[in-house]
Amino acid sequence: MTELLAYYARRAQEYERIYAKPERQADLAWLRRRLGELLAGRRVLELACGTGWWTEKVAPHAAEILALDASDEVLAVARAKAYPPERVRFTRGDCFAPPDCGRRHDALLAAFWWSHVPRARLEGFLRDAEAAVAPGALMVFLDNRYVEGSSTPIERRDAAGDTYQRRRLDDGSAHEVLKNFPDEAELRQAAGASSREVAVETTQHFWLLRYRAA
Ligand SMILES: C[S@@+](CC[C@H](N)C(=O)[O-])C[C@H]1O[C@@H](n2cnc3c(N)ncnc32)[C@H](O)[C@@H]1O
């Protein structure tokens, strides 16, 4: 198990507190609305679904969602939520080796996952993610922007350019977590190599990238 995975397994029960930060509420409402619009009627493959916070928000709009995470602990929280009947399935799996679903999904969603992908693995991750969904599928990623006073401070940057935060959990444990904050140019460049219709939208706290897979 990776350190990142162990951290999120331990955080499962307290994870959704992050969505209660008062200063982020307006931006989160906007994101929910945008995801509902973008993913309406689509067959969605959701990577790193975590506790299903976004799965629950998108489910009323999507045709179906297959939601994947590598942690049994967060999947247990996600599975306990209520979804429209027959529309949502969960599976344990690795974002870096997405399952073969016959390329039946016409959209891919990954919320707050991009920031945890080491820069050196980003291109390979995107290539494999695109290969897991239908040709021309809509790729949707969203994540945090760094906001002084709201974001956990960055403690260090390594030689590859990856940045790290030190986070504490309720049990007193401390964890160093890789958390990158790409700017718009980096997002466009990462998406651009093999894609079309790239669009980046930002709010104060979040970015939302979408493009069509090749
Ligand atoms: C920041 S959380 C995002 C959860 C959810 N998408 C959200 O936005 O609330 C990152 C998630 O990635 C999962 N994770 C970590 N490494 C993974 C991997 N290699 N494959 C799949 N999921 C992984 C963790 O278990 C955690 O649920």
Image (cartoon, rainbow, N blue to C red):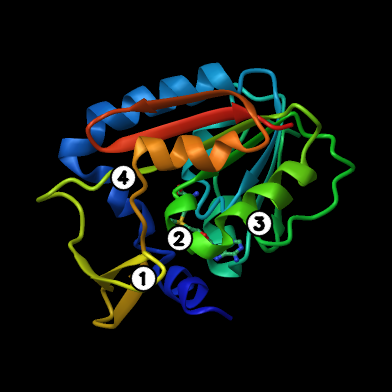
Amino acid type indicated by mark 2:
His
Rate crowding at label 2 as few (under 14), some (14 to 19) or many (20 or more) other CA atoms within 10 Å: some
Question: Closer to the observer: label 1 or label 4?
Answer: 1
* Amino acid on which the number 3 mark rests in the picture: Gly
Rendering quarter of residue 62: top right
Whole-angstrom CA distance, mark 2 to mark 4, is 18 Å
Helix, strand or loop at label 1? It is: strand
Whether label 4 lies within 8 Å of ligand 1 gets the answer yes
Q: Which residue is mark 4?
A: 19
Marks 2 and 3 sit apart, C-alpha to C-alpha, by 14 Å
Q: Which residue is mark 3?
A: 124
Name the residue rendered at 29%, 53% in the picture.
Answer: 17
Query: Which-is-in-front pick, marks 4 and 3?
Result: 3
Of all residues shown, which one is farthest toward the right? 102
Circle 4 packing at 10 Å, graded few (<14), some (14-19), many (20+), is few
Look at label 4 and name its amino acid: Tyr
Going from N to C along the chain, the mark reached first, 2 or 3, is 2
Q: Position of residue 19 (x, y in %)?
A: 31, 45
Q: Position of residue 139 (x, y in %)?
A: 62, 33
Residue identified by numbered label 1: 177
The residue lying toward the viewer, choosing from 189 and 20, is 189
Q: Residues within 10 Å of mark 3 (few under 14, many from 20)?
A: few
Q: CA distance from mark 1 to mark 4?
A: 18 Å
Mark 1 in CB contact with mark 2 (< 8 angstroms): yes
Comes first in the chain, label 1 or label 3: 3
Above or below: residue 76 compared with residue 190: below
According to the picture, the residue beneath numbered tag 2 turns out to be 116
